[in-house]
């Protein structure tokens, strides 16, 4: 019995040690600007494809959060272009540059009833700064809480080359 407990304790220790390493993040290098790709889901498909030949569909709102993680210097959002599943530009959500102060946040909202983007929608966000800063954290919180059920999940941006 003691060997079994030791084995279980060892496995639990290994599991927690591995998860600590998995969740650790390194500081991202300072930079003067980037172009970011942020996946957006204005709806999601779920369930089974039945006799109709289609899966069920749930509409989603999306709260895009652009957070300046630099505690000393502002950044500028030059543009936030919203594209649909097919890569067609739907709209520019930041028509003129917006400054985000240190530790500040800019929010962009896609309504629950806005289905124009589809399940493969995305934002291309361009930002810059006068000098190298900590890059912003750009995420989107997707939600639908209709009918006594809740669907909530997040997506995070990745830098892309142009």
Image (cartoon, helix red, strand yellow):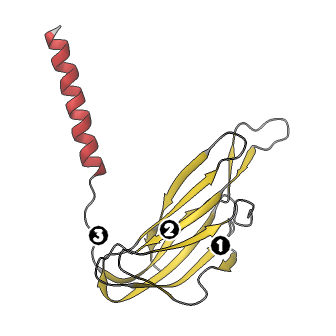
Q: State whether residue 30 is above or below residue 86.
A: below
Q: Mark 2 or 1, which is nearer the eye? A: 2
Mark 1 element type: strand
* Residue 98 left/right relative to 55: left
Which of the pair 96/39 is nearer the observer?
96
For label 2, the SS is strand
Q: Where is residue 119 in the image (x, y as percent from the top left)?
A: 66, 58
Tally the numbered discs: 3
79 left or right of 31 in image = right
Disc 2 versus disc 1: distance between alpha carbons? 17 Å
Depicted 162 relative to depicted 113: above or below:
below
Image coordinates of residue 42 in percent, x first then y, are 67, 60
- Dot 2 or dot 1: first in sequence order is 2
Q: Pointer 2: what residue?
A: 65
The circle on residue 83 is 1
Q: Where 117 falls versus 91 (above or below)?
A: above
Q: Distance between the residues labelled 3 and 1?
A: 27 Å
Toward the right, the furthest residue is: 52
Residue drawn at x 54%, y 58% is: 141
Q: What element carries label 3?
A: loop
First reached walking from the N terminus: tag 3 or tag 1: 3
Task: Please tell me which residue is depicted at 20% across the width and 13% down the height of the picture.
Answer: 4
Label 2 or label 3, whichever lies nearer to me, is 2
Q: Which class describes the residues within 10 Å of circle 2: few (<14), some (14-19), or many (20+)?
A: some
């Amino acid at each position: 019995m003691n060997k079994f407990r030791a084995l279980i304790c060892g496995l639990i220790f290994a599991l927690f040690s591995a998860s600590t390493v998995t969740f650790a993040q390194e500081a991202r290098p300072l930079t003067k600007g980037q172009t970011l790709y942020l996946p957006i889901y204005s709806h999601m498909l779920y369930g089974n494809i039945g006799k109709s030949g289609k899966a069920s569909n749930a509409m989603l709102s999306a709260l895009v959060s652009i957070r300046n993680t630099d505690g000393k210097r502002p950044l500028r959002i030059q543009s936030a272009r919203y594209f649909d599943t097919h890569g067609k530009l739907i709209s520019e959500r930041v028509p003129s540059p917006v400054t985000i102060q240190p530790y500040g946040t800019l929010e962009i909202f896609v309504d629950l009833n806005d289905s124009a983007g589809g399940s493969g929608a995305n934002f291309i966000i361009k930002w810059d700064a006068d000098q190298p800063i900590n890059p912003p954290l750009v995420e989107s919180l997707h939600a639908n809480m209709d009918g006594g059920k809740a669907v909530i999940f997040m997506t995070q941006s990745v830098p892309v080359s142009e």
